[in-house]
Image (cartoon, helix red, strand yellow):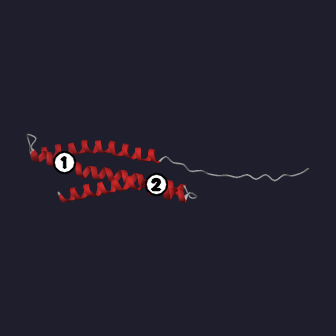
């Protein structure tokens, strides 16, 4: 009986489509923005009922705009939070692919920074109108 040495290897390859990630972020922002607009409309309607407004005037449109600013800022922060949790989970699972992860983070930084800038600007405008 002769014994032969057989070498067995195991390799894990991580792959991810960044285009799908950005599309998912856009879908989340679009869907939640529509819900934020509906919620802003309901807030404005409640304010006009409490203020005793009978007709729609300029101040009602201003309130609608201001409520939209705050709610859109909340939407952007929620989407960024979800994306950050997703990246955290991906990072924790991917222990051997640090170079791959660094490249993905650098590429996807543009989408996240755009949301951050918009969210901070909208929140600042919302706070200035208080």
Q: Residue at x 49, y 46 (%)?
A: 17
Question: Residue 86 location in percent, x, y?
Answer: 45, 52
Question: Residue 11 location in percent, x, y?
Answer: 64, 52
Toward the top, the furthest residue is 55
In three-dimensional space, the C-alpha distance between marks 1 and 2, rounded to whole angstroms, equals: 33 Å
Callout 2: helix, strand or loop? Answer: helix
Q: Which residue is mark 2?
A: 87
Question: Residue 98 location in percent, x, y?
Answer: 54, 59
Toward the right, the furthest residue is 1
Indicate which disc residue 65 carries: 1
* Badge 1 or badge 2: first in the primary sequence: 1
Residue 115 falls left or right of residue 37: right
Q: Is residue 51 above or below residue 100?
A: above
Residue 29 falls left or right of residue 1: left
Callout 1: helix, strand or loop? Answer: helix
Q: Residue at x 22, y 45 (%)?
A: 40
Q: Residue at x 21, y 49 (%)?
A: 67
Q: Residue at x 24, y 59 (%)?
A: 124
């Amino acid at each position: 009986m002769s014994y032969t040495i057989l070498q067995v290897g195991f390799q894990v390859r991580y792959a991810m489509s960044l285009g799908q990630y950005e599309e998912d972020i856009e879908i989340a922002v679009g869907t939640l923005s529509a819900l934020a607009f509906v919620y802003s409309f309901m807030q404005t309607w409640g304010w006009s009922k409490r203020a005793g407004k009978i007709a729609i005037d300029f101040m009602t449109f201003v309130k609608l705009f201001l409520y939209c600013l705050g709610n859109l800022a909340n939407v952007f922060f929620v989407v960024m939070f979800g994306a950050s949790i997703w990246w955290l989970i991906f990072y924790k699972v991917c222990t051997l692919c640090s170079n791959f992860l660094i490249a993905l983070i650098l590429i996807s930084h543009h989408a996240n920074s755009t949301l951050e800038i918009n969210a901070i600007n909208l929140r600042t405008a919302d706070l200035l109108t208080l």
